[in-house]
Amino acid sequence: PRSSSPEPEVEPRRKRPFQAQVQVPAQNPEEPLSQGSLVMKFTQVLNRNRQPKYSVEFVSKADQ
């Protein structure tokens, strides 16, 4: 096998990051302040080797 052969290029994806919001139900429905939304920020970029690199961030937002 050729270890020095370059890997096939990956099709460039849309630069716009993919965001998915997941609703997290509160343990106690009588406490609305405990409710919150979990936002997952998924981003794909290409590094210098043109290999896909994935960046995932979880952000917790409290509904006020």
Image (tube, rainbow, N blue to C red):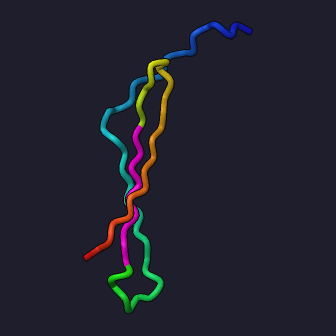
Residue found 40% across the figure and 69% down from its top: 23
Residue 14: which quarter of the image? top left
Q: Is residue 10 left or right of residue 35?
A: right
Give percent across and percent down for residue 43.
40, 40
In the image, what residue occupies the spot 44% across and 88% down? 28
**Residue lying farthest to the bottom in this orientation:** 30
The image quarter containing residue 31 is bottom left
Find residue 62 and report its image quarter.
bottom left
Residue 22 higher or lower than 41, as above or below: below
Q: Which residues are magenta?
A: 35-43
Q: Which corner quadrant holds the N terminus? A: top right
- Name the spot of residue 27 as percent of width and height, x first: 47, 84
Question: Looking at the image, which residue is at 42% across and 50% down?
Answer: 57
| Spot occupied by residue 58 in the image (x, y as percentages of width and height) | 43, 56
Farthest residue, direction right = 1
Q: Is residue 11 above or below residue 64?
A: above
Q: Is residue 54 magenta?
A: no
* Viewer-proximal residue among 31 and 8: 31
Determine the residue positioned at 45% across, 47% down.
56
Would residue 32 appear left or right of 55 to someone viewing this image? Answer: left
Q: Quadrant of the C terminus?
A: bottom left
Q: How many marks?
A: 0
Residue 35 position in % (x across, y down): 37, 78
Q: Is residue 42 above or below residue 14?
A: below
